[in-house]
Amino acid sequence: MIKITTQPTTEPVDVDYVKSILHWIDTDTSTEAVIADYITAAREEIEKRINVSLVSKTYRQWVYPENMQDKSINLAYPPHHEVVEVVRIAEDGDETTLTLNSGYNLEKGKTYRIKFDVYAFHRVDFKAGYGTDYGQTLPVLFKAAIAEQVGQWFEGDVEVGILSDNVMAKINRYSMNNLV
């Protein structure tokens, strides 16, 4: 199980970017509010589909022993930047904070992989996502995909919450689902 513990403060694109990409000139403030909501919805749906964090966030991931492979697990939603805290949770609920190389090891790469010393329940807090906070630039293709999806939802070409085939084709090359 995973949850976001620190929500993003900005979106990867803004209303003006979408309007310029889609050549929309005349919109009023109520329309711009809808576009802003669609930007957030498109980003969230893309993140969910390809297991990548498009903006900076902090996550909490619970690790169950039965989901480990050789006492290891990949963290969800790369690109990763920092492991903030790793906690082992005993059967009686007691929590022990672990330190790097004493309780777990960390392999850095496209995605972070944590290897624990024992099979047990763990909780991992980590920071991930593209953004200036970590020096990772969001690929332009993601920005274009978000703008395209917003346009398709706004114009009624695709049901809100469904990613179009064109958008899926753009984002699938970045999918990290095969690593989870």
Image (spheres, rainbow, N blue to C red):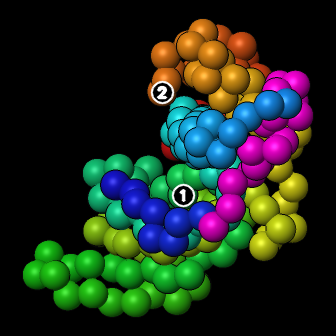
Cα distance in 3D space between marks 1 and 2: 25 Å
Q: Which mark is residue 2?
A: none
Mark 2 surroundings within 10 Å by alpha-carbon count, few (fewer than 14), some (14 through 19), many (20 or more)? some
127 and 38: which is toward the camera: 38
Q: Which mark is residue 161?
A: 2
* Image coordinates for residue 125, horizontal then vertical, percent: 48, 74
Which residue does the image show at 79% across and 36% down from the upper left?
A: 18
Which residue does the image show at 46% across and 63% down from the upper left?
A: 4
Residue 114 placement: quadrant: bottom right
Amino acid type of the residue that numbered disc 1 sits on in the rendered structure:
Leu
Relative height, residue 168 to residue 108 (above, below): above
Q: Is residue 171 left or right of residue 75?
A: right
Relative height, residue 26 to residue 28 (above, below): above
Amino acid type of the residue that numbered disc 2 sits on in the rendered structure:
Gly
Relative height, residue 82 to residue 168 (above, below): below
- Counting residues from the N terminus, which is met first, the one under dot 1 or under dot 2? 1
Q: Is residue 60 left or right of residue 148?
A: left
Q: The residue tagged with tag 1: helix, strand or loop?
A: loop
104 and 13: which is toward the camera: 13
* Image coordinates for residue 72, horizontal then vertical, percent: 48, 59
Q: Is residue 40 magenta?
A: no
* Image coordinates for residue 82, horizontal then vertical, percent: 66, 75
* Image coordinates for residue 14, horizontal then vertical, percent: 76, 49
Q: The residue tagged with tag 2: helix, strand or loop?
A: loop
Which residue does the image show at 60% across and 9% down from the upper left?
A: 157
Q: Which residues are magenta?
A: 9-24
118 and 130: which is toward the camera: 130
Front label number (1 vs 2): 2
> Circle 1 is placed at which residue position?
75
Mark 1 surroundings within 10 Å by alpha-carbon count, few (fewer than 14), some (14 through 19), many (20 or more)? many
